[in-house]
Amino acid sequence: MRFFVNLGVALLFLASLCHANEESFEKQYHYFTSYKEAHAKAVETHKPLMILFVTTSCPWCQKLESQTLKKESVNAYVQAHFIPVFLNKDIDSFPKSLLPVVSPTIFFVEPKEEKQFYDILGYKSAVEFLELIQEANETFMKMHP
């Protein structure tokens, strides 16, 4: 019996080492984790902010990351047209005017006036998400011809 307990402890330890070496979603996909830094970059580049709000225990947030945001076509479009920000609404600091009601929520924010102009609520498939972010970009372009 003791052998199995020790084996279980060893396997848990090895699993935690493997997980520790994994790069987080926000680092791997080049999302800012600081609203202030992202806002400064948005002002500099004249790109809107795309702020992804998640919570720690949100299964739909994890599904959005793994099945939508990690898709090459989605990430390429996000990186080309927005300054992406990954924030945990329970932990991270951000303007309280942007407080989301549900998770995941994505707010698109005009950089100079810091006003939200578009949002996406809840999980979306990659195809649907790509259509919505293209619509968000078109909205921004109409605001700034």
Image (cartoon, grey):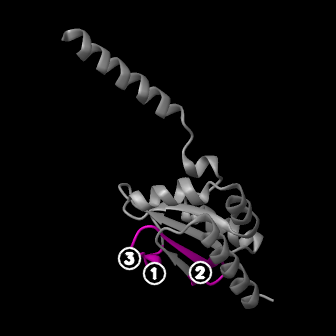
Quick one: label 2 or label 3, which is nearer the N terminus? 3
Q: Is residue 84 within the magenta segment?
A: no
Where on the picture, by quarter, is residue 10? Answer: top left
Residue 90 image point, x, y percent: 36, 62
* Quadrant (top left, top right, bottom left, bottom right) of the C terminus: bottom right
Q: 137 or 132, which is in the foreground?
A: 132
Amino acid type at image mark 2: Glu
Q: Which residue is mark 2?
A: 114
Where on the picture, by quarter, is residue 116? Answer: bottom right
Residue 58 image point, x, y percent: 38, 59
- Contact check, label 2 and label 1, Cβ < 8 Å: yes
**How many C-alpha atoms fall within 10 Å of the one at disc 2: few (<14), some, or many (≥20)?**
some
Q: Residue at x 57, y 52 (%)?
A: 26
Q: Which residue is mark 3?
A: 101
Amino acid type at image mark 3: Val
Label placed on residue 97: 1
